[in-house]
Amino acid sequence: MAAVLAGLIGGLGVSVLQEFTTTPLILQAETFETPRADEGANKPTPPVAQLSERAAHAHAARESTDIRNRVERAFYTTIANILTGIGFALILVASITLHGQAVEGRKGVIWGAAGFAIVNLAPALGLPPEVPGTLSAELGARQSWWFLCVAATGAGLWIIVFRRGALWVLAGLSMMAVPHLFGAPQSEESGGAVPSELAAHFVAASLVTAAVFWCALGWLSAVFWMRFSDQ
């Protein structure tokens, strides 16, 4: 129940935040994927009155379609964020429970920050968040490297935090570095339709949004876990 409530609130919150951070950048990037063709180059030009009427109808149709698409996109994004939040919150609550010590809200933020470092920050060193229209390597190879990076970072961070001694710290750091020594799969071609400034802005916005999401999720998970464990 603690994980469900934390994931529900965290997913709703990050969905609202994304509407002002990453979603506008995605919509802007998608415009660069649409080819612009001059369909009327060889057609006779209609009278001005007909052009104005057609333009008005076309503009109204586009606005109606855009609104429906935005609502549908926001709905499915929110559902996905809630389910993702519940899944991550289950991992956080399970980890807190196995830790065996009381974790209040402030310590929960630290647990959430660790989740951000494992799931988002470390993989972003090799595979930064991408907007539509960005050239990238084959999906299967990227997913395999992402799972390797998450597992190695999580295990290495656990060793550093919960084991004592310089050798353990060295072992944890070495484990975290292994995926980056191999290197993430990259596209053979460089560039893409999206401007580099927009892509860089999206990377920064995605990571900041993910950091807020994870810290909030850690705080909520700890607060609800303490509340239900006391009953």
Image (cartoon, rainbow, N blue to C red):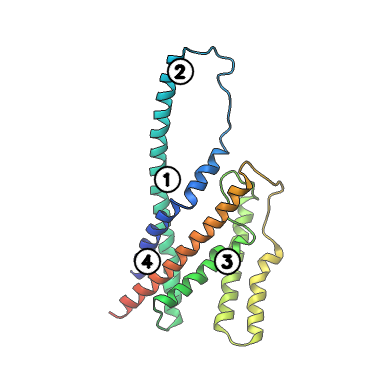
Contact (CB < 8 A) between labels 1 and 2?
no
Q: Amino acid at mark 3?
A: Val
Q: Which mark is residue 150?
A: 3
Residue to which mark 2 is pinned: 51
Contact (CB < 8 A) between labels 3 and 2?
no
The spot of residue 67 in percent (x, y) is 39, 38
Q: Which residue is drawn at the image coordinates 41% and 42% (left, top)? A: 70
Q: What separation in Å lies between label 1 and label 3 (alpha carbons)?
A: 28 Å
Q: Amino acid at mark 2?
A: Leu
Residue to which mark 4 is pinned: 6
Contact (CB < 8 A) between labels 1 and 3?
no
**Considering only order in the chain, which callout, 3 or 1, is on the residue closer to the N terminus?**
1
**Considering only order in the chain, which callout, 3 or 4, is on the residue closer to the N terminus?**
4
Above-or-below relation of 69 to 159: above
Position of residue 181 in the picture relative to residue 19 (left or right): right
Quarter occupied by residue 97: bottom left
Q: What separation in Å lies between label 4 and label 2 (alpha carbons)?
A: 54 Å
Residue to which mark 1 is pinned: 73
- Label 3 secondary element: helix
**Considering only order in the chain, which callout, 2 or 1, is on the residue closer to the N terminus?**
2
